[in-house]
Image: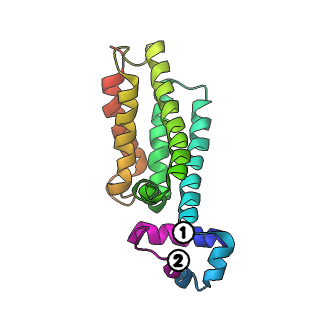
């Protein structure tokens, strides 16, 4: 039942927003009582935190697998962008909830999420810096700004990306990487 509560909440938060979705809305959509909700979660914010942790933890696990591969930094960067796009395609409402509803977490929970987000960002930055060291990428770039530009572009995709649209997540990832690497590659 906990999984059903989480799934339905992601759907409702994604469609209506966190503040516009009540616990009553969630339990009515599932056909259960508030007692069922409170058996698994103390409050709606705890549920939101669970959604956030699941989203970022899943990304970190997938990113770690990519980082530990023996491939080039260019390939690792592509795989990270593709993984993010694929995640948006497969978990679109979760991405929407993660980015849009983060503001409703208290400071302690936000700090925990920001630590994990920073870890994700630092992993991308390290790949870029390693590519700069090995000569795959230009050495005159500011790795932090490049990292933020990549994350800004890809993370905003949850807002407009339609997996059933003209381009799938792999095609969009290739366009992103082409755009980014033409500015990153060593001459």
Q: Residue 146: x, y in percent?
A: 36, 29
Examine the structure image and report whether residue 12 is included in the region drawn in magenta.
Answer: yes
The single residue placed furthest to the front in the displayed view is: 107
Residue drawn 36% across the image and 50% down it? 157
Specify how the rendered protein is coloured: rainbow
Residue tagged by mark 1? 44
Residue tagged by mark 2? 23
Element assignment for label 1: helix
* Figure check: 164 above or below 130: below
Crowd rating for badge 1 (residues with CA inside 10 Å; few <14, some 14–19, many 20+): some
The N terminus lies in quadrant:
bottom right
Q: Residue 94: x, y in percent?
A: 49, 59
Examine the structure image and report whether residue 123 is included in the region drawn in magenta.
Answer: no
Asked where in the image residue 154 lies, by quadrant, the reply is top left
Q: Residue 114: x, y in percent?
A: 50, 43
The C terminus lies in quadrant:
top left
Front-most of 62 and 114?
A: 114
Q: Main SS type for the magenta part?
A: helix
Residue drawn 45% across the image and 24% down it? 128
Q: Tell me if label 1 and label 2 are in contact, CB under 8 Å.
A: yes
* Figure check: 132 above or below 180: above
Query: Is tag 1's residue or tag 2's residue first in the polypeptide sequence?
Result: 2
Crowd rating for badge 2 (residues with CA inside 10 Å; few <14, some 14–19, many 20+): some
Q: Which residues are magenta?
A: 7-26
Cα gap from disc 1 to disc 2, whole angstroms: 7 Å
């Amino acid at each position: 039942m906990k999984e059903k509560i989480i799934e339905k909440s992601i759907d409702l938060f994604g469609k209506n927003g966190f503040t516009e979705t009540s616990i009553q809305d969630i339990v009515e959509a599932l056909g259960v009582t508030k007692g069922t909700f409170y058996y698994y979660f103390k409050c709606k914010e705890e549920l939101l935190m669970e959604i956030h942790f699941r989203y970022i933890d899943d990304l970190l696990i997938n990113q770690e697998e990519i980082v530990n591969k023996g491939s080039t930094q260019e390939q690792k960067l592509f795989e990270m962008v593709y993984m993010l796009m694929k995640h948006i395609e497969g978990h679109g409402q979760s991405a929407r909830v993660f980015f849009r509803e983060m503001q409703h977490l208290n400071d302690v929970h936000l700090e925990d999420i920001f630590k994990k987000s920073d870890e994700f960002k630092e992993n991308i930055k390290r790949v870029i810096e390693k590519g700069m060291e090995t000569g795959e990428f230009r050495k005159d770039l500011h790795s932090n700004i490049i990292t933020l530009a990549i994350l800004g572009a890809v993370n905003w995709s949850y807002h407009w990306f339609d997996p059933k649209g003209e381009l799938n997540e792999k095609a969009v990832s290739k366009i992103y990487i082409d755009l980014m690497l033409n500015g990153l590659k060593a001459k």
